[in-house]
Image (spheres, rainbow, N blue to C red):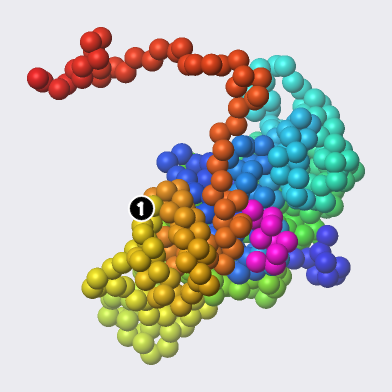
Amino acid sequence: MAETGSERTIYIIDVTNRDGVQTANLGLAKLEKTIINLYLDQMGIFQSEAGFPTTNHETEYLRGNLRLAQKGAIKRLRISGWLRAIKADIELGLEMVPELEHINISISTSPQMIEGKWKGKRSFKDVVDTMEGSLSRALELGFKTVGVNAEDASRTPMEDLLIFAEVAKKGGACRLRYCDTLGYDDPFTIYDRIKTLAEEVGIDTELHCHNDLGMAVACSVAGAKGAIDGGVDAYINTTVNGVGERAGNADLLSCILAIKKSSGMKERYKIDPHIDLKYSWRLAKYAAYAFGLPIPVNQPGVGKNAFAHASGIHADGALKDRRNYELYDFEELGRGEPEIIETGRMITTGSYGGIKGFRNVYDKLEIEFESDEEAREILDLVRLANVTTQKPLTEDELRFIAQYPEEARMILTLTPYQKPEIREKRTEITRKVSFPWVNSTGRSKGSGD
Ligand SMILES: [Zn+2]
């Protein structure tokens, strides 16, 4: 429930580092995920669903980010993990990331998923029982907050959803995540359904909307409205630039702008007061660079054309009074600062960099090292970081590594895991793999010689 007690509030839980990175053709290095968490924190976002605690390659990154929070480098942003609502997964998640305090546990609730995935082996009652047991185990293990996700909630009959939400609330869940997994809702249906859930059950609700029908932002905002009107707090799941499975998730900035600037919501619905839009430009640009995914020119707020005027009537109008053709100011989003692009000699540092180039790059950032030894240590981390990102490191990435080398070391650590009993037994690999472009003599088929 709202910390203020009286006024219901809309918070943001960003899922770029979970839903965004699990998307086909997209991915982020752990350093990039970390920088996104730091920027989200700067922007005053409430929570980052930062990854998968039971996935081996996420462990050190998650632990490193939780350490950054302990140190105060991440000030308010909650770092949370996504887990299946399975007791063994929850236990393993805590074993792998012991510092983790906030999680969401997920299970499918719709007839489509229950029948389509489990093929009659499970009933809706089994789903509710599994969720109840997992939730109880998570709380018993000491997790501070446990959100319960109803996957495919929008295709789940209302009477089932009410039962699921009621059991989650009674079991001690902090929130229900209403997943519009396939983007099936429209703003009107989601408003009604969320309002009913809020009124009948009274559990704070997360809106998790996908963009398959182009309505993810509209549905998130309408759902949040339904939650507030029904008397509970709303938490919108967003991603930076709307990246996410298939057609994507609800775009972070668009959701905030819709709540702060639209005729029906501005000044009538309260958004988390910590949110500071002036970091949105930096965050959007960084995510675009890190994902290798350019921002569409017509993207709200951060697209190249978001404040561009070409036609005579528009340009004239905008020059006379910006409000003629601009609903909000670019300065508010952190745009308008000049950007310096190097046009002459450029010295970079990276995977194969040496100490001279490295020092030149850090001199420009006005970062000095106390000794050669310290410089070489940071250089080593910079090399590793560049191996994982495969593109020139940004100034903030370089600053981060210099300021938090221990955490950077953790975040960059990837160790293939193998159960000891398997490692001991396997002396050499005997598997034979044939490569289709190599013939039986071992010569390339296409070589022509
Ligand atoms: Zn999703």
| Figure check: 360 above or below 140 | below
Residue 235 lies in the magenta-colored region? no
Residue 84: x and y, percent? 70, 35
- Three-letter amino acid code of the residue under disc 1: Tyr
> Could you say which is closer to the camera, residue 394 or residue 360?
360
| Figure check: 302 above or below 170 | below
In this figure, which residue is indicated by the disc labeled 1?
Answer: 352
Q: Quadrant of the C terminus?
A: top left
Query: Start and end of the magenta stretch?
Result: 64-73
Most extreme residue toward the bottom is: 320
Residue 405: x and y, percent? 57, 60
Residue 334: x and y, percent? 49, 76
Q: Quadrant of the N terminus?
A: bottom right
Residue 278 in view here: yes
Residue 77 in view here: no
- Report the residue at 74% width, 49% height from top: 100
